[in-house]
Amino acid sequence: MPDATSDGALFLRAARGEDTPRAPIWIMRQAGRYLPEYRALKERHSFWEMVRTPELAVEVTLQPVQRFDLDAAILFSDIMTPLPPMGVDLDFDPGPVFAEPVRTRAQIDALAVPDGGELAPFVADALRLLRAASPVPVIGFGGAPLTLAAYAVQGGGSKDFAAFRGFLRAERGAAHALLEKLAEVTLRYLRMQVDAGAQALQLFDSWAGLLDERSYREFGQPYAQRVLEGLADAGVPRIYLAVDAGHLYPAIDELAADVVSVDWRRPLSAVRRALPGKTLQGNLDPAALLGPAEALTLESERVLHEGLGGPHVFNLGHGILRQTDPDAVARLIDVVHGFDRRAAAWGDAVPRRPSAAGREHA
Ligand code: CP3
């Protein structure tokens, strides 16, 4: 297992913009239902209970780190964690279900904006324990204002968030008031996580891709930017994730993020041209872990080749699927760790003879 000072720091080096000799790897939703040890704990505790009990959150966070040779740990929590302290009542089944959607100006005006210390003391406790116990760097996270607003206004998950997208048009002033409060709470929440020991932060803007670029530039980007800029002096790399958001890359490129996490829809080489100054994180299709071992190896190597030419943190394009066999994760990590980026970059620089044609990166 890598340790936090030498090999484990590879993740932090790549996140800070270094073109490292091998790509570090962590996996979105690496702690979760595909792991039998997570399911066993879940039989005895509810999701909220695990999130709100520091010892349990630490145990779940470290489950994948103990089982696999991962290069980072992500705090076990949820992007919804700061909403109940604001006065928004919600539960999980398994996704978030809100007691009442937040849709009126009066509801929004009534939302609290608590201090960082009041927001989720159990998260600060969990992070402090993790820093002492984790052999690899610890990633904290939060939801971007737009994505949190999408859930709060919709009242839960949705395929298209139609009520939310209608609300942005019908209640523009109220929408901005809600986003303002969410941006302030998110900034306080993430600063608190750095103070408690988080060594990197990921801002999940999972639903930004639902908006056209103009709407994103009004309702999404400025609020994500306020959070990211507010963390500029925190001294930790900032990762921004949006899914199905290729059309937003010109706006995302302007964000004060060090790393952009990209889904599997475009090759990393093309994304790198759109986001030239960023470390790229991704972008294996989570479904690749459901296929045969040889196909997983080939597809992972293709992602690794596509990631050459700049800093790369290997990850999936979105969260791991719950039907994934943990053995496939172990194989994936072996492939990533066995890939020498310098030798591969040199190989790519050598002109290929015609017999080598057909290799996709040639
Ligand atoms: O990545 C990790 O391992 C850290 C933990 C983590 C969870 N949620 C645990 C979780 C993280 C980083 C999240 C973020 C999150 N939560 C996002 C952004 C990432 C993304 O997927 O785009 C979103 C949109 C949510 C909201 C949420 N919470 C949903 C949609 C669901 C249910 C569906 C699902 O994917 O599992 C949850 C519940 C949830 N959050 C579970 C876990 C492990 C499953 C709870 C259970 O055990 O039943």
Image: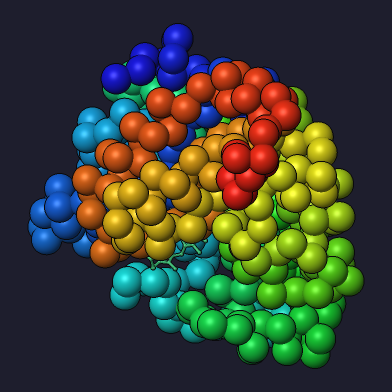
Give percent across and percent down for residue 339. 47, 27
Measuring 51% from the left and 22% from the top, which residue is drawn there? 340
Give percent across and percent down for residue 15. 62, 29
Relative vertical location of residue 308 with respect to residue 52 in this rendering, above or below: above
Quadrant where the C terminus sits is top right
Compare residues 92 and 267 and report the one nearer the observer: 267
Quadrant where the N terminus sits is top left
Give percent across and percent down for residue 33. 25, 58
Compare residues 168 and 252 and report the one nearer the observer: 252
Toward which corner of the image does residue 42 lie, by quadrant? bottom left
Outermost residue toward the top in this view: 6
Relative vertical location of residue 235 with respect to residue 73 in this rendering, above or below: above
Measuring 64% from the left and 88% from the top, which residue is drawn there? 162
Q: Quadrant of ligand 1?
A: bottom left
Give percent across and percent down for residue 40. 11, 54
Relative vertical location of residue 85 with respect to residue 335 in this rendering, above or below: below
- Numbered circles on residues, count: 0
Compare residues 33 and 53 and report the one nearer the observer: 33
Res 134 visible = yes
Res 229 visible = no
The image's colouring method is rainbow
Measuring 64% from the left and 89% from the top, which residue is drawn there? 163
Toward which corner of the image does residue 93 lie, by quadrant? bottom left
Q: Is residue 71 left or right of residue 55?
A: right
